[in-house]
Amino acid sequence: MRNVEITGWGKCMPPNVLSNHDLEQLVDTSDDWITTRTGIKERRISHVEASELAAVAGLRALAAAGKTVDDVDLLMVATCSGDSIIPSTASVVQKRMETWNAAAMDLNAACSGFVYGLVVGTNMIRGGTYQTVLLVGTEKLHHLLDFTDRSTCILFGDGAGAVVLEGSDESAGVLASDLGTDGSAGHVLEVPVDGTMGDRGHPDPAMCGISMEGQEIFRRAVTKMSESSLIALDKAGLRLDDVDLLIPHQANSRIIDATARRLGLDGAKVYVNIQSYGNTSAATVPVALTEALEDGRISPGDIVLFAAFGGGLTWGSLVYKWGSRVTPLGKSDAELPPPDRNTLELLRPNFDFFGLPERMA
């Protein structure tokens, strides 16, 4: 079976910051309350669309791989908050990047989307259908945040991360994976009125934002991420002792900690950056991977375990053996345009649609 390796990586985080102290001015909460329960200190609010975040992250990943846009023959975009349904966000990203040789498609498995995408992209190359896959996780989740609901508006942020996948002769790549879904519990994390279910004439704002049952999400996320990780490790013929680094979906620090404890994995082997970005859904894993490499947390030959859980309800894990290169081959000069509004101004459409936050009413 042909090996498939991650040869490039990159991220794009918008510059506007929404801190816990900013949220104290909007809703009845505090920095201590948010930090204690979620681990989040701040999150990013994007002044551009998810496709533009994706394009910049993608160009940075290509440069790290020493590739050009002409080398890409499949572009996959994992997102649940893309620019539009038609055209797909991937089509818009193709236009922004000018990856004209690539087929392009969206993949929506919510927060598990990037892990799903790694499995799909790997198998596309193994099957001989494509040679170079660019996989991007990108989200503009603040569009879905109701700042009158303090239980959800503190959790989510915007951002993008990307990797390049290529066939390889190295003893590296995906060793095993496990994916799952429980559609019967989809209502536990949802945007109730979206797509064709919505009422075009009289949308109910309260039904158009992210809705979730926090305690149920916590229980299911910890259970499924740990179970799935053990299944993938067993398929790979490995044990937890063989894992050098766990890169989990960054949903909540308590979920991450509980998953690590359930697995019996030393916290020093778990990569966490939720404090800086909050939950960016499909973008959390590639952003964390990029920063883990930048921080020197991954060495050649390391066994990296990816685990995620998200809306659907979906979950997935993947055991990956890192190759010989942990530094980028090049650097892209791609950048976002500077923001023309401050963070509060970027959130104004949310306030107008969902209603003013408690402290502003």
Image: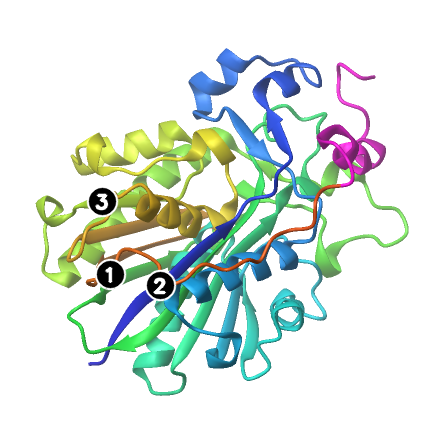
The residue under label 1 is: 325
Q: Are marks 1 and 2 in contact (CB under 8 Å)?
A: yes
Residue 86 at x, y = what percent? Answer: 72, 69
Of tags 1 and 2, the one toward the viewer is 2
Q: Which residues are magenta?
A: 340-361
Q: Which mark is residue 245?
A: 3
Q: Secondary structure at mark 1?
A: loop
* Crowding at mark 3 (Cα within 10 Å: few <14, some 14-19, many 20+): many
Residue found at the far bottom of this picture: 128
- As measured in the structure, the alpha-carbon distance from the residue carrying label 1 to the one carrying label 3 is 16 Å
Q: Residue at x 71, y 62 (%)?
A: 84
111 is within the stretch colored magenta: no
* CB atoms of marks 1 and 3 within 8 Å: no
Q: Which residue is mark 2?
A: 329
Q: Nearer the viewer, mark 1 or mark 3?
A: 1
Residue 281 locus on image (x, y percent)? 51, 46
Q: Is residue 346 magenta?
A: yes
* Rendered image coloring scheme: rainbow
- The amino acid type, in three-letter code, at marker 3 is Leu
Which callout, 1 or 3, points at the residue further toward the start of the chain? Answer: 3
Label 1: few (<14), some or many (≥20) within 10 Å? some
Instruction: Using the numbered discs, state the Cα–Cα distance from disc 1 to disc 2 in whole angstroms.
Output: 9 Å
